[in-house]
Image (spheres, helix red, strand yellow):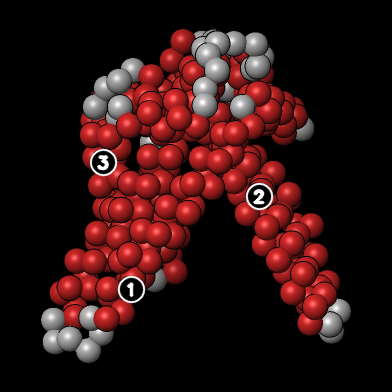
Amino acid sequence: MGRIATTIELAKASWQVLKADKELVVLPILSGVASIIVAMSFLIPAGFLQGSESVGTVEYILLAALYLALAFVTIFFNTALVYAANERLSGGDPTIGSAIAGASKHLPQIFVWAAISATVSVILKSLQERAGILGQIVIGIVGLAWTLVTFLVIPVYVVENVGVKEALTRSGNLFKKTWGENVAAQVGFGLLGFLAAIPFVLLAALALSSGTEAVAAIGIIVAVVGIVAVSVILSALNAIFQTALYHYASSGAVPGDYFDNDNFAHAFVPKRR
């Protein structure tokens, strides 16, 4: 229960940072809208190309470009969130404009990290599709390990203004130092999001079982809006926690008054057998 309580406290602290800059939830929304626009800009041309003799090669190229473009959009706005969180923790007062401008300063790192992330995702997905059940489990574990080890790449290149190669090395080293609750906290944030989404899922199920089209439509709309809101807030909270974790892992203390360093200290103490 101790680690669960610590994770809850870390989530509460991240929430307090978000409350100080509520407008930052706009960044995940912008990321979603931009991703939809990018996806449509690739998928529509791909639809027109159906029936062409060279459709295989062209579609493959479009798919690779789509993966890269979507990764770039996602990482760009995640970088903006981390930049804003770091500004708030450092005593500043971030805005949407300052966050986007801050991310724009790191366009080379964002592009390189997007290319690496997209490539790794495509390779892992391709291997999983060809592997058996045991192979899929192993590849899934490899993918999880990659996510954990690279969790602090964005805060590293945002705060330290280094290249992606050095950011990857630093992220791996920081993970080794603070691996304990790093894993548990990330899982905890995902669990909190899952629990928050359950009421909306139940609402949609009840609406569909009502037998009335109007009630079903309203229920589904409310449920979708609620789940999207949970996803947006969770994305912002995750970026804030990511930034705070970087500071604790690199210096042993989180700047500002939002996070209690004792929570991090207790979090990263391995359980005794």
In the image, residue 115 sits, relative to residue 214, either above or below, namely above
> Is 67 on the left or on the right of 175, as rendered?
left
Judge by depth and name the residue closer to the eye, 83 or 172.
83
Q: Looking at this rendering, what residue extends furthest in the front direction?
A: 97
Q: Which mark is residue 44?
A: 1
Is disc 2 in contact with disc 3, using a CB cutoff of under 8 Å? no
Judge by depth and name the residue closer to the eye, 117 or 36.
36
Residue assigned mark 2? 229
In the image, residue 148 sits, relative to residue 106, either above or below, namely below
- The mark that comes first in sequence, 2 or 3, is 3
Q: Quadrant of residue 146?
A: top left
**Residue type at the position of mark 2:** Ala
Residue assigned mark 3? 111
Kind of element beneath mark 1: helix
Q: Percent from the top left, x then y, of residue 128?
A: 37, 65
Q: Closer to the observer: label 1 or label 3?
A: 1
Q: Residue at x 30, y 37 (%)?
A: 110
